[in-house]
Image (spheres, grey):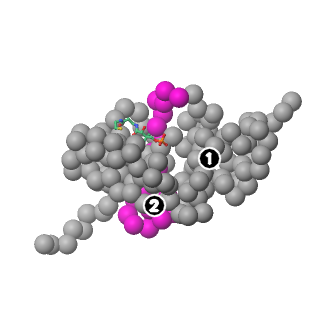
Amino acid sequence: MPESTASVIAIYPGSFDPLTNGHLDLIARGSRLVDRLVVAILSNQAKQPLFTVEERAEMLEEVLKPYPNVEIGRFDGLLVEYAAQRGAKVILRGIRAISDYEFELQMALMNRRLQPEIETVFLMAGEAYSFISSKMVKEVASLGGNISGLVPALVERRLKGQFKRP
Ligand code: PNS
């Protein structure tokens, strides 16, 4: 089979409310596997986010500056449509524990049914990050707990700002 010279573009979709060190680890590792990685924020979310899409995009832009082949995108509607629009053949997702598997499998199979030529590729979360979720980080921060090492320093400052007591 002739070797393909087309560049591989992947989409790493999520809510990123906010970005955690688990996301960051996945982005760093994922970006080494592809030519271009688009970190795509879902903007039409049913659940009430803590940070606006603009705030989330701004934090991602800042933290992801050191990664030259990573860019930030936003989407609403179907992920596979956005992926196709961006010329991406790969959707990147992370799996932390067996509890993530069922939802991720459902999503991957639905996305494959909708757009069979786009593959979902899973990376196992780094062992140091497998217990971190945006939801839990927000809860700990809201209760005044220590979140250092769980999120990038910029995100930690923003979270502390959100939950500063008057
Ligand atoms: O960070 P999250 O909340 O786990 O990300 C979930 C996300 C954004 C990947 C998922 O909700 C999504 O892809 N939504 C877009 C709507 C869509 O395409 N649905 C059909 C396939 S499940």
Q: Is 104 left, or right, of 115 in this rendering?
A: right
The answer to if 86 sits in the magenta stretch is no
Which residues make up the magenta segment? 27-47
The answer to if 29 sits in the magenta stretch is yes
Residue at image point 24% right, 68% down = 5
- Which image quadrant: the N terminus? bottom left
Q: Position of residue 19 (x, y in %)?
A: 59, 48
Q: Residues within 10 Å of mark 2 (few under 14, many from 20)?
A: few
State if disc 2 and disc 1 touch (CB < 8 Å): no
Q: Residues within 10 Å of mark 1 (few under 14, many from 20)?
A: some
Q: How many marks?
A: 2
Q: Amino acid at mark 2?
A: Met
> Ligand 1 is located in which of the four quadrants?
top left
Q: Quadrant of residue 159?
A: top right
Q: Which mark is residue 59?
A: 1
Is 103 or 148 nearer to us in this picture? 103
Q: Amino acid at mark 1?
A: Met
Residue at image point 66% right, 53% down = 151
Q: Which mark is residue 20?
A: none
Q: Quick one: which residue is furthest to the left in this view?
A: 1
Q: Is 20 left, or right, of 41 in this rendering?
A: right
Can I make out residue 143 in this image? Answer: yes
Is 49 or 129 nearer to us in this picture? 129
Q: Is 113 left, or right, of 102 in this rendering?
A: left
Residue 66, above or below 56: below
Q: Which mark is residue 124?
A: 2
Q: Position of residue 162 (x, y in %)?
A: 74, 36
Residue at image point 58% right, 47% down = 133
In three-dimensional space, the C-alpha distance between marks 1 and 2, rounded to whole angstroms, equals 24 Å
Residue at image point 66% right, 45% down = 137
